[in-house]
Amino acid sequence: MSQIQNTSRSYSDEQLHKLAKQIKVWGQELGFQQIAVTDTNLHNAEEILNNWLEQGCHGDMDWMAQHGTKRTRPAELIEGTHRIITGRMDYWPPDIVKAESILADASKAYISRYALGRDYHKVLRKRLQMLSTKIENEIGEFGYRVFVDSAPVMEKPLAEKAGLGWIGKHSNLLNKEAGSWFFLGEIYTDLPLPVDNPAEKHCGTCQSCIDVCPTKAITQPYVVDARLCISYLTIELKGIIPENLRTLMGNRIYGCDDCQLCCPWNRFATETPEADFMPRHHLDDVTLLALFSWDEKTFLKKTEGTAIRRIGHERWLRNIAVALGNSLATADEKIKKEIIQVLRKKLDDTPEVVKEHIIWALKQA
């Protein structure tokens, strides 16, 4: 068990309220749109998680079932934790090619908007560490650990409790002023800071996200079966993509944003000022054939510092092969001929997993 070194220092309520207020100011200065504080009680989230796991909705993500109750009981993960400082940072880039236009063009590759720029883990972790250093400079040594999707942390339930937003029917966090296009990060700390009020849910009777999901992965409000989710299929799943789901994936080669694109609350989303989240290598508007031509060396170079790199070259080719197969249904004869030629050429020297999907793609002609 990791442990926060408890400094055993005492603070008055006035000092703690003043510090919490200052932490929020520092957070905004460091690029966070919002900072809030909550306690460690995740009893309701624990029950929901256990039910989800019992149904097998996590698929091959065995790590979701590991660590026992450390995921839902922060003080068991990091001994000495009393509060969680949680922050959100917007990532929707300005001047981006409209997602809807890319999804409508079968020759283009759709990459989830969060992955177009620099890996958010690196960006948020650095900023949260800077925030922690500011706190330390103000009050002296204190106990803390920084997390950005890097440990068994229930980031969305914690953010909901802290008032950053509410968990929508698509399982993403929603904010009335910012929609859902933002990242989350946490600081586990021993400081007994005052907590913020939790958010109320505002989805009402809307179920646009449920209706629009290409694979019907949102099996009921607030429940996503990862085994059907395109984000899971293209990112987490390491092997063969179920054949019955391939045509439903369209041209989505890394993640899926459909449930967010249709959400009415995202009309309030604001563009990010973060240069790190700007699209790299024109990945917001690039053809499937261009990306399929990348050898492993090119893939590693072009995806350096991004979240995309974690899936590796093999899954990258697998996903694009499926998308190319889907594009054959609407391509004109000239493009269709080129796609078939490229797919056949790749068959000669490719891993078995990729070959399986190329063979399927060729059958779609």
Image (cartoon, rainbow, N blue to C red):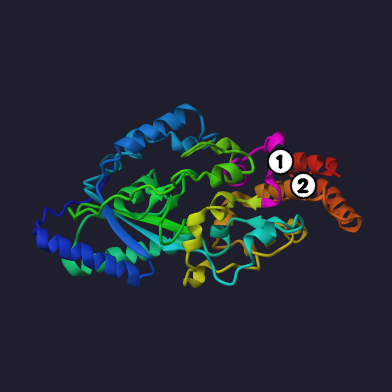
Q: Is residue 149 left or right of residue 313?
A: left
Q: Nearer the viewer, residue 257 or 53?
A: 257
Do residues under tags 1 and 2 come within 8 Å of each other at their CB atoms?
Answer: yes
Residue for badge 1: 246
Which residue is found at the position 16% from the left and 65% from the top?
Answer: 18
State the image coordinates of residue 194 (x, y, percent, origin top left).
Answer: 19, 55
The residue carrying pointer 2 sits among few (fewer than 14), some (14 to 19) or many (20 or more) residues within 10 Å by Cα, namely: many
Q: For residue 313, which numbered disc appears in the image?
A: none
Count up the numbered dots: 2
Chain part drawn in magenta: 232-252
Q: Nearer the viewer, residue 18 or 345?
A: 18
| Residue 216 picture location, percent across and down | 60, 38
Image side of residue 326 versus residue 341, left or right? left
What is the x, y in percent for residue 63? 46, 38
> What is the secondary structure assignment of the residue under circle 1?
helix
The residue positioned 47% from the left and 43% from the top of the image is 205
Say which label, 1 or 2, has the lower sequence index: 1
Check disc 2 and report the residue beneath it. Answer: 326
Label 1 – label 2 distance at C-alpha:
8 Å
Examine the rendering and report whether any part of residue 323 can be seen. yes
Q: Is residue 230 left or right of residue 173?
A: right
Up-down relation of residue 100 to residue 207 (above or below): below
Residue 72 occupies which quadrant of the picture? top left
Is residue 182 highlighted in magenta?
no
Q: Quadrant of residue 292?
A: bottom right
Does the magenta segment cover residue 249?
A: yes
Instruction: Using a 10 Å C-alpha cutoff, classify the residue at mark 1 as few (fewer than 14 neighbours), some (14 to 19) or many (20 or more).
Output: many
Three-letter amino acid code at the position of disc 1: Arg
